[in-house]
Amino acid sequence: MPDNHFKHRRTPRRAVYLVPNMFTALALLGGYYSIVKSIEHEFVLAGWAIILAAFFDMLDGRIARLTNAQSEFGKQFDSLADVVSFGVAPGILAFQWGLEDFGRLGFAVGFFFAAATAVRLARFNVAAMQQGNFFVGLPSPVAGVIAASLILVIGNEPTLGQLLMVCVLLVLIAATMVSEIKYYSFKQIDFRQQINGSLLILAALLVMSIAVLLVLEYGAGGFLTGGLIYLIYGYFLTSRVMIRQGKMLRARGESGFQLVGKVIAKFLRSGYRDK
């Protein structure tokens, strides 16, 4: 009798852990669906599936934090789903969409994007890839959304110039994911302390309404613009840090060559010292 009562009391708590993992599974489904549609050359559906997967990926972590249902299993599951949805799926989409015209080069670009996503998430799991309110490296969902929305904006008949632009941008995004460029993280904002439950629901509905209006008005261009602004923001933020470090070294009377060398060396080592 006591055992049955104990099991009955633990069931609701297990259900709480299940909810965020269901959203992770939906994000993984979006990535899988995108891969299938890319193979079938239905690139519009494939691109929007990646963007939808990013939406579910955004929700799973926030739901886990709001319900205090974070777990090591959820962390690993989320990372594996992200590799598929924001690494493999965009890489296959880009290759099937047009990069296959470049042969091995196009294949290499798509694979590099997928591999960089896997490396970034592996580093995130084993090292301190979040320093305070900042991520180290571009978050993979943002990278996947930029890649997908860029293809959606260009359309199904890209020119040679557009294909080359996509190649360069995908390489840049992939390199930024595994770089030491810092990006602001909104995960540290504790909505439970800022607003009560009713206002939280209203705020969520407002955000969703704005997102729907942006999609209806601007389509994928809205996501592309937002993603590119976030991408550039990281470089701007990191350049400010480098300039500040340069001023500190200049105040010590360093020569020009010593100044440049120490700033670059300190920047490259900064992330590894914090791990």
Image (cartoon, rainbow, N blue to C red):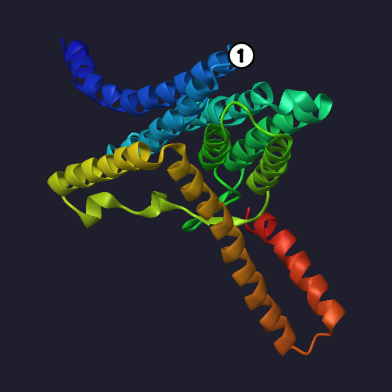
Numbered marks: total: 1
List the residue tagged with mark 1. 39
Looking at the image, the residue that sits furthest to the right is 257
Kindly state the secondary structure of the residue where label 1 is placed: helix
Q: Residue at x 31, y 37 (%)?
A: 212
Q: Residue at x 58, y 18 (%)?
A: 38
Left or right side of 254 for 81: left
Q: Is residue 152 visible?
A: yes
Amino acid type shown at disc 1: Ile
Q: Position of residue 150 (x, y in %)?
A: 56, 38
Vertical order, 13 against 204 (above or below): above
Vertical order, 216 against 254 (above or below): above
Residue in front for this viewpoint, 261 or 113? 113
Q: Position of residue 157 (x, y in %)?
A: 62, 27
Q: Is residue 68 visible?
A: no
Judge the density around disc 1: few (<14), some (14-19), many (≥20) Cα neighbours within 10 Å. Answer: some
Vertical order, 148 against 188 (above or below): above
Looking at the image, the residue that sits furthest to the left is 198
* Quadrant including the N terminus: top left
Vertical order, 42 against 61 (above or below): above
Left or right side of 204 for 28: right
Q: Residue at x 55, y 26 (%)?
A: 80
Q: Position of residue 227 (x, y in %)?
A: 51, 47
Residue in front for this viewpoint, 238 or 209? 209
Left or right side of 169 for 101: right
